[in-house]
Image: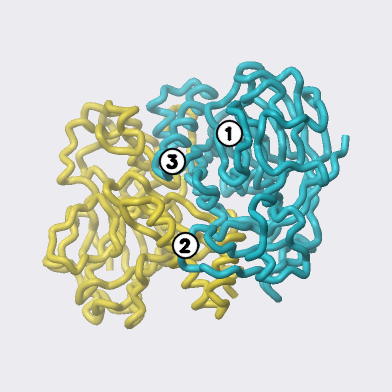
Chain colours: A yellow, B cyan
Amino acid sequence: MHFPRTRTHTSWDRGLAPIAELAPGQELTVETVEASGGQLSASAVAADVARMDFARVNPVTGPFALPQARPGDALVVEILEMSLGEWGWTACIPGFGLLAEDFPSAHLRISKIADGHAELLPGLRVPVLPMLGTIGVAPPEAGPHGMVPPRRWGGNMDIRQLGPGARLVLPVGVDGALLSLGDAHAAMGDGEVAGTGVETDAVVRLRVDLVQGAAPRSPLLETDARAQRTGRALATTGIGPDLMVATRDAVRALVDEIARRTGLAPEDAYLLASVAADLKISEVVDVPNWVVTAHLSVDLLS
Amino acid sequence: MHFPRTRTHTSWDRGLAPIAELAPGQELTVETVEASGGQLSASAVAADVARMDFARVNPVTGPFALPQARPGDALVVEILEMSLGEWGWTACIPGFGLLAEDFPSAHLRISKIADGHAELLPGLRVPVLPMLGTIGVAPPEAGPHGMVPPRRWGGNMDIRQLGPGARLVLPVGVDGALLSLGDAHAAMGDGEVAGTGVETDAVVRLRVDLVQGAAPRSPLLETDARAQRTGRALATTGIGPDLMVATRDAVRALVDEIARRTGLAPEDAYLLASVAADLKISEVVDVPNWVVTAHLSVDLLS
């Protein structure tokens, strides 16, 4: 099953008609379009950024229905492979980004993507680490809901480690789940501070599965070994408008997962997190919700 | 020059008499005592944690004066080597830690430290990554100042990457600088969420140097290659009571450093940070000040 990057939508909405039905265990290949939705090209200039229509940004391909999925189930998505476009864009967008007040003007760089690097400027080659900025399911509340903020249902989480080899667990909010994905990056730092990574087209091969009644409180993932100092890691999320609350939520979720998987007492799970888990600010630009992740090597969970 | 772990103090104070004078470029060996200051032993139990006198915690060895240092200079400290004690402690301390409300009772685990691992519980072996929780200089304001919160002058920053191979740059606040260090950890996660790592005695070999008039706005460091997914990295800090402000401060400092070291325009430095720098919550427990760090591979700075 192969889905072209023309089958996109630009808001989350439980009322959208699915573009296909998937069975648990199914593999599919999904083309995604870069985050401007075709408004920027490889020859774009800063003035094109200033002219962008925000209603068209961050398109996602989908939605895909899993007819058996029910609210309260867990949707498991394995990212098997990503191939990227030959160019990407990175911009300061006026009014957007962590330091929007310091950088009020539009600014744009086009990277050539080749040989495992994105060349942001002549000679400045950033290692490619492909990832999906946006992947999520339809919220249960009637839509439309904007594409920019991530939510309990995933979406624009911009978690750097969500690339090939990662396994994401999302809570299902509506019958059929309604999965969509997009916003691929050739490279992005934890935080995505200017609001953009190296934004590019991608072809994503993934596998979906379903676990009845296992919805996590907030999305969680297992990351590829190459994405972390510690090798493969379990990562939990805290998503919301307050970084401290998001930090507490991510750590609470990690403590719960450690206790559940290992049988450790909660107090010992908390101590293990204190000595071995890493806290990352995964995104701090997708207004109004930020994402904090807590990562623990899976070696410590066995 | 070798200094025993009996030469400690438990508050920052510009009025303290230095225990030794150092010359720029000098190497020294400093013993540090674990963070309870001798109140806990390898046979301690949870009740001993509840009885701890907080006025005695987090002792640092020092202060060391560099007679030539003046306010506005940069003090450069290279951590050359750390050897650790044979045991360490990790605790929930009532009223302390990110989830203090969830974990109101004292809880204690003693780890055996051997063969590159700290054994937090029987069979649960956490890889050792030695680091210094506390290193700083005297604040210019008359003291005493408590040991728990980090400040612009360093102190209890609890930055996981501040171990052997790291190079720390601190602003000098008073004549002579008055450097002190302590609070070694055999292992700690970014965040130190329960408020403690694997707290242990250490012997630290370090080299100090001075750069006239080069005080950073906030401490910055270069981390050892082994501490990061990206290899050796430059890390800037944001220190304060609001995570969002600390995040902005760390990113602003990184953008400034990138621009200064590479000659990139600030806008391009900001884009480089967005696609390649990682944001970590280094500590979120040392009330009332948290530390956010922004890390960029030094390969991207040359």
Q: Which residue is mark 1?
A: B220
Left/right of residue B10 with respect to residue B273 in the rendered view: right
Please tell me whether residue B198 is drawn above or below residue B62 in the rendered image: below
- Label 2 resides on the chain identified as A
Q: According to the image, label 2 marks what residue? A: A251
Q: Amino acid at mark 3?
A: Thr
| Residue with the mark numbered 3 | B247
Callout 1: residue from which chain? B
Chain-order first, disc 3 or disc 1: 1
Residue at (33, 73) in percent of width and height? A75
Check disc 2: other Cα within 10 Å, few if <14, some if 14-19, many if 20+.
Answer: many
Residue at 54 percent of width and 24 percent of height: B261
Crowd class of label 3 (few under 14; some 14 to 19; many from 20; radius 10 Å):
many
Residues B246 and B91: in front is: B91
Amino acid on which disc 1 is placed: Leu
Chain assignment, label 3: B
**Position of the C terminus of chain A by quadrant:** bottom right
Residue A36, position as x, y percentages in the image: 23, 43
Label 1 with label 2: CB-CB less than 8 Å: no
Three-letter residue code for mark 2:
Val
Q: Are marks 3 and 2 in contact (CB under 8 Å)?
A: no
Element under label 2?
A: helix
Q: Viewer-proximal residue, A102 or A34?
A: A102
Assess disc 1: are there few (<14), some (14-19) or many (≥20) residues with their C-alpha within 10 Å of its C-alpha. Answer: many
Q: Is residue B62 visible?
A: yes
Q: Is residue B21 above or below residue A53?
A: above
**For the point 62% across and 25% down, which residue is it?**
B173
Can you say which quadrant of the picture contains the N terminus of chain A? Answer: bottom left
Residue B127 screen position, x and y as percent: 68, 61
Residues tagged by mark 3 and mark 1 found on one chain of the structure: yes
